[in-house]
Image (cartoon, rainbow, N blue to C red):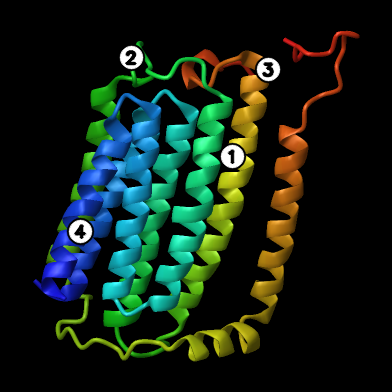
């Protein structure tokens, strides 16, 4: 198994774990954490391809990961603010108890 | 390098499973920190030092603290006595397993991946900075704008609403 394949397989497993968490957990914060795990898996893929996937643009993969990290940080901040706003209205962060569109 | 990769990969996956399946929220947050740290280690084994440090700063530092604060602010009971999963749990786990299995099968059978594992030379930080400051300037400015907007948006969203009653302590239901 080549080094690239090993990293890709680890990233695929991490993505699957994050997806399972995001799909099944009731707590909204852990759903957000699952999404973070999926993003980390994507970053791992990008860096592995940048290292082992040919030499066309070696810095491109890492630059892309930098932008993904920045956008993920913004996404987490806004997501957690939404969860706190939800908690303030409903006194819960369990997703199945917040299933109406009207506040 | 070989041993480091195996240790980090196993630690990453075990911590990820624990973070997504434990019942106690604080334990989940700690396992999440372990996942992010192990991912930073994997970045190091790939020769991406700057990204490993960015990962430690942003994820292990900032995002974990943010998640822990959100857990504390929204805590109703430390241990969730009720069911952990919202939908049929087997369905979600099966779907995720199918996605991961499909990707792994594709990786193992694909002929598009380069056969020879010729590692590109590690990209020095100077090269990364030059790339950011020359070719990627519009994207860099856009990210700066996005971060500012997200910061303001998060503050506005989490802002306490003006009290409706004179006593004012209780948030509006």
The picture places residue A45, in percent across and down from the top left corner, at 33, 66
Give percent across and percent down for residue B120: 29, 89
Q: For the view shown, which residue lies furthest in the left direction?
A: A1
Q: Which residue is drawn at 39% across and 32% down?
A: B26
Co-location on one chain, circles 4 and 2: yes
Q: Is mark 4 on a helix, strand or loop?
A: helix
Whether marks 2 and 3 lie on the same chain:
no
Q: Are marks 1 and 2 on the same chain?
A: no
- Reading the image, the residue beneath label 1 is A79
Q: Residue at (76%, 48%) from the top-left corner?
A: B152
- CA–CA distance in space, label 1 to label 2: 23 Å
The chain under label 3 reads A
The chain holding disc 1 is A
For the residues labelled 4 and 3, the Cα–Cα distance comes to 41 Å
- Tell me the quarter of the picture where residue A98 sits: top right
Q: Distance between the residues labelled 2 and 3?
A: 22 Å
The residue lying toward the viewer, choosing from B150 and B116, is B150
Label 4, on which residue?
A: B9
The residue singled out by tag 2 in the image is B83
Q: In this view, does B52 lie above or below A36?
A: below
Quote the CA–CA distance across marks 1 and 4: 28 Å
User: Percent position (x, y) of residue B15?
Assistant: 26, 45
Crowding near pointer 4: few (<14 within 10 Å), some, many (20+)? many
Q: Mark 3 points at which residue?
A: A89
Say if residue B106 shows up in the picture.
Answer: no
Q: Return the chain for callout 4.
A: B
Label 1 SS: helix
């Amino acid at each position: 198994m080549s080094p690239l394949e090993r990293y890709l397989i680890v990233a695929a497993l991490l993505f699957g774990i994050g997806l399972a968490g995001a799909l099944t957990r009731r707590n909204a914060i852990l759903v957000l954490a699952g999404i973070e795990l999926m993003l980390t898996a994507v970053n791992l893929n990008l860096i592995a391809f940048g290292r082992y996937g040919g030499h066309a643009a070696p810095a491109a993969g890492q630059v892309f990961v930098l932008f993904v990290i920045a956008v993920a940080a913004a996404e987490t901040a806004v997501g957690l603010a939404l969860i706190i706003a939800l908690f303030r209205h409903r006194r819960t962060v369990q997703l199945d108890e917040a299933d109406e569109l009207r506040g | 390098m070989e041993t480091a990769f195996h240790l980090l990969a196993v630690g990453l996956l075990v911590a990820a499973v624990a973070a997504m399946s434990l019942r106690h929220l604080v334990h989940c947050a700690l396992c999440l920190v372990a996942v992010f740290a192990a991912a930073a280690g994997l970045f190091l084994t790939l020769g991406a030092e700057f990204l490993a440090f960015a990962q430690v700063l942003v994820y292990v530092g900032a995002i974990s603290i943010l998640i822990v604060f959100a857990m504390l602010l929204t805590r109703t009971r430390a241990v969730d006595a009720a069911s952990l999963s919202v939908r049929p749990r087997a369905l979600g786990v099966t779907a995720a397993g199918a996605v991961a299995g499909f990707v792994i099968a594709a990786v193992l059978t694909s002929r598009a991946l380069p056969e020879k594992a010729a590692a590109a030379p590690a990209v020095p930080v100077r090269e990364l900075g030059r790339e950011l400051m020359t070719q990627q300037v519009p994207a860099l400015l856009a990210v700066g704008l996005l971060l500012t907007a997200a910061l303001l948006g998060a503050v506005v969203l989490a802002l306490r609403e003006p009290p409706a009653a004179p006593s004012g302590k209780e948030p509006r239901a």
